[in-house]
Image (cartoon, rainbow, N blue to C red):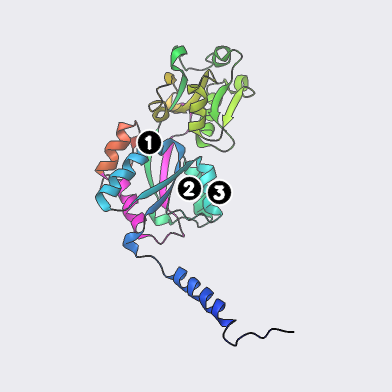
Amino acid sequence: MTRRLCPLSWRAPLLAAMLVVAVGLVPAPAAAQDVLVFAAASLKNALDDIGALYQKASGHKVTASYAASSVLAKQVENGAPADVFISADVDWVDYLDQRKLIKPETRINLLGNRLVLVAPKAEAAPLAITNGFPLAQRLGTGRLAVGDPAHVPAGKYARAALEHLGVWSSVADRLAPAASVREALALVSRGEAPFGIVYQTDAGVDPGVAIVGTFPADSYPPVIYPGAIVAGSENPNAVTFLGFLGGPSARSVFEHYGFTVLATPK
């Protein structure tokens, strides 16, 4: 026996589905929108503090996702719903710009940083970083922790510095490549690597490491952190947050953590 449907029975689920879709298409009020930031891992401590200040000042929450700049740029390329992208080098913002995935008029160079050599605090001994310095000998049987030079900005800067100083070939096969600069830092802090190359600001937030040498500023390209609003973002609070990053409150936090502030205060 074939069951006959009530003329309206097939319409009910359809109408319900249409209602759900319609409700989903109604945007949340702009004032209620929080800000989603994709930021280089080395920014975590400073941006967490700044996010708290921004929320107190504006009432809007900042949610940040931290990883290597390359990983985050690829996520934006694949449609991740970020509002603001802050990279640890210009290349990955250029990458998104070339694909029309940021709003170029919002792009700003926010910060600068320095490269340092770190060691576990209990074993730290100064090492003068000059042409041909004996890094390989000091490594012994250990490995050098770095952000993966193929993908991670800190690793690319590290390779450039070591090449400039003439020691790259002696350590290239003795790396402990990490997925982000913070992971490289952790390898040293845990004593799993005798040395690591990280940003000066990273060394300052981990009590388990000590800086044993600072790389000459002319041995690698300038470390610049550009920020921009992601092309797909329609969140008006993204604009105010990016402006907040160039303001006096954020400047104080960035300088506290050792960053060089490049953005003009507003």
Q: Secondary structure at mark 2?
A: helix
Q: From what the image shows, is residue 17 above or below residue 59?
A: below
Question: Amino acid type of disc 3?
Answer: Lys
Most extreme residue toward the front, as rendered? 1
Q: Residues within 10 Å of mark 1 (few under 14, many from 20)?
A: some
Q: Name the residue tied to disc 3.
A: 74
Q: Name the residue tied to disc 1.
A: 45
Camera-nearest residue between 36 and 100: 36
The quadrant of the image that shows the N terminus is bottom right
Displayed quadrant of residue 83? bottom left
The image shows residue 114 at horizontal and vertical percentages of 41, 29
Question: Which of pointers 1 and 3 lies earlier in the amino acid sequence?
Answer: 1
The image shows residue 192 at horizontal and vertical percentages of 55, 21
Which mark, by number, is residue 93?
A: 2
Question: Which of pointers 2 and 1 lies earlier in the amino acid sequence?
Answer: 1
- Is 45 on the left-hand or right-hand side of 21? left
Camera-nearest residue between 205 and 127: 205
